[in-house]
Structures are given as structure tokens and as C-alpha cells.
Image (cartoon, rainbow, N blue to C red):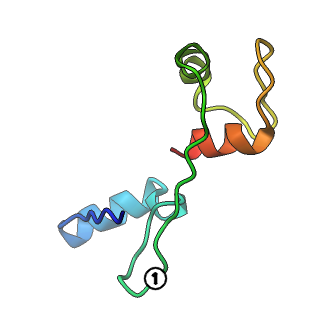
């Protein structure tokens, strides 16, 4: 499945968006010629997701103490 989104804005707004760090996110593409962003959705229980949502956004080193997900799963969840 492919989802496409976009924005129309004035040049001043574009500068504000880029200054806010939009271009450093994993999902930002400045051209249709760029490769699409692939999101990996890790499998967590509802209780685990609630625990993770409470801690987001988190640092790369953070891991929950209540259960043992991989660092890759935490990073993928944070990206989503």
C-alpha cells in the first residue's frame, strides 16, 4: 500500500517548516523522485503500547523496564 500526502504553502511557511526540522524526519521527501519511506510497525500488546505511548518521544537508549522489546522495535515504534 502506498499513501501519498503533501502540503501547499507560501515560501515563508516553507522556511518555517524546514526550520522546525521537518526535513530531518524519516518520512519527509522533497521530491516524487525520492524513494518512498517504509514504515515498520512492531507488534505490541495494547498494554505495551500504552506504556510506550507514555514514554514517547524517547531517546535511542531508552528501554522499558516492564517488558523486553528490542531496541529496533522501540526505534520503529518511535518513528511511527
Q: Position of residue 48 (x, y in %)?
A: 61, 18
Q: Position of residue 35 (x, y in %)?
A: 49, 79
Residue 61 figure quarter: top right
What quarter of the picture does the N terminus occupy? bottom left
Q: Is residue 10 left or right of residue 26?
A: left
Q: Nearer the viewer, residue 55 or 17?
A: 55
Residue 70 figure quarter: top right
Q: Position of residue 22 (x, y in %)?
A: 44, 58
Element assignment for label 1: loop
With respect to residue 53, does 70 lie above or below? Answer: below
With respect to residue 9, does 60 lie above or below? Answer: above
**Residue drawn at the location 35% of the way across and 66% of the way down:** 2
Q: Is residue 33 left or right of residue 9?
A: right
* Residue sticking out furthest to the bottom: 33
Q: Which residue is mark 1?
A: 34
**Residue drawn at the location 48% of the way across and 65% of the way down:** 23
Residue 16 figure quarter: bottom left
Q: Is residue 46 left or right of residue 31?
A: right
Q: Position of residue 20 (x, y in %)?
A: 44, 53
Amino acid at each position: 500500500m502506498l499513501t501519498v500526502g503533501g502540503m501547499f504553502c507560501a515560501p515563508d511557511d516553507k522556511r518555517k517548516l524546514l526550520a522546525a526540522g521537518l526535513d530531518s524526519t524519516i518520512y519527509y521527501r522533497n521530491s516524487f523522485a525520492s524513494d518512498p519511506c517504509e514504515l515498520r510497525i512492531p507488534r505490541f500488546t495494547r498494554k505495551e503500547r500504552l506504556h510506550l505511548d507514555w514514554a514517547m518521544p524517547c531517546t535511542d537508549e531508552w528501554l522499558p523496564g516492564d517488558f523486553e522489546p528490542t531496541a529496533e522495535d522501540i526505534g520503529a515504534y518511535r518513528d511511527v
